[in-house]
Image (cartoon, helix red, strand yellow):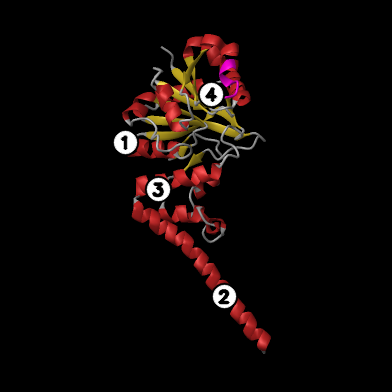
Amino acid sequence: MSTVDVILVNWNDADNLIAALDSVFALPEIKADPDFASVTVSDNGSTDDSLARVQQRYDSRVQIVENGRNLGFAAGVNRAVAQTHAPYLFLLNPDAMVQPGALRSLADFMERHPRCALAGPKIYEADGSIAESCGEFDTWLGAFLRSSAWGEWPWFRRFANAAELRRWDYSNERRVDLLIGAAVMLRRSVFEALGGFDERFFMYHEEVDLAKRVNEAGYEAWFVPSAQATHSGQGSSGGRGVEAYKQRSRRKYWVKHHGRLWYYSLSAALMGRYVLYLALLGGAAAVVRRLAMR
């Protein structure tokens, strides 16, 4: 049995998918031991030539799970997990690529840290800058500041979500609340015990929801910079109502983990700030009129 099952969820993203798979098969740990990792593509009903190109290029080296339609990321991963068996799962977006030694570093780290259920590499953007790949769980105030321009004001910046992480240079191993799902390793036993991804999250925030449940179950998430990957962020979801998906998934997450009162009070506060803006504008206009009448 393999040590790692690499899983890529694909939907009409042939060029990126091939590049991502090439990066996996170029890993020295796989070249030295082809049985170290198995690779599965979970295809969400692609209508481009994704599957034909994968089969032509890799043949039996890649297992293909055909879902028949676009089930979303969470369901796509769950379907692939059900068809695999390795103790560790590595999720890789088609628009991401792993760098040499990444899988070995993450698997070795998880072997040394049995309470670690999520381990993420250092991720670089396409321009070479370091991606903010780690995050903190929402507090009410943090969510308010992140969702409004107030979080960028000097007086409030230190209270905004993940403010401490933004001052960190991503150079050292660190326990964190959550990791982005573009490239992340999961401990299968914990993932399965928690029921996998919540498929109500079609796209976005499914990894935040999983990290929250991992934390509540007493397990850990770690950032491991000895493993590295790149993420272009130009995959199949790009430009197709991405912000709407993000907002919808964020609302589902807030209601699921914080309750409706928490969510609706936050929504009211976010709306209320516009009332405050209007009141301030009205007050300023009144002052200007008085000054003009003198």
In the picture of the structure, the residue carrying the numbered disc 2 is: 282
What residue is shown at x 47% (from left), y 32% (from top)?
Answer: 72
Kind of residue sitting beneath label 2: Gly
Kind of residue sitting beneath label 1: Ala
What residue is shown at x 35% (from left), y 38% (from top)?
Answer: 213
In the picture of the structure, the residue carrying the numbered disc 1 is: 217
Q: Marks 1 and 4, Cα distance to the nearest angstrom?
A: 27 Å
- Sequence-wise, the earlier of marks 4 and 2 is 4
What residue is shown at x 47% (from left), y 56% (from top)?
Answer: 144
Q: Is residue 48 magenta?
A: yes
In the foreground, 81 or 157: 81
Q: Secondary structure at mark 1?
A: loop
Q: Residues within 10 Å of mark 3 (few under 14, many from 20)?
A: some
**Residue 102: mark in rendering:** 4
Q: Position of residue 16 (x, y in %)?
A: 61, 26
**Residue 164: mark in rendering:** none
Observer able to see residue 33:
no
- Sequence-wise, the earlier of marks 3 and 4 is 4
In the foreground, 270 or 248: 248
- Sequence-wise, the earlier of marks 3 and 2 is 3
The magenta span reads: 46-52
The quarter of the picture where the C terminus appears is: bottom right
Q: Residues within 10 Å of mark 4 (few under 14, many from 20)?
A: many
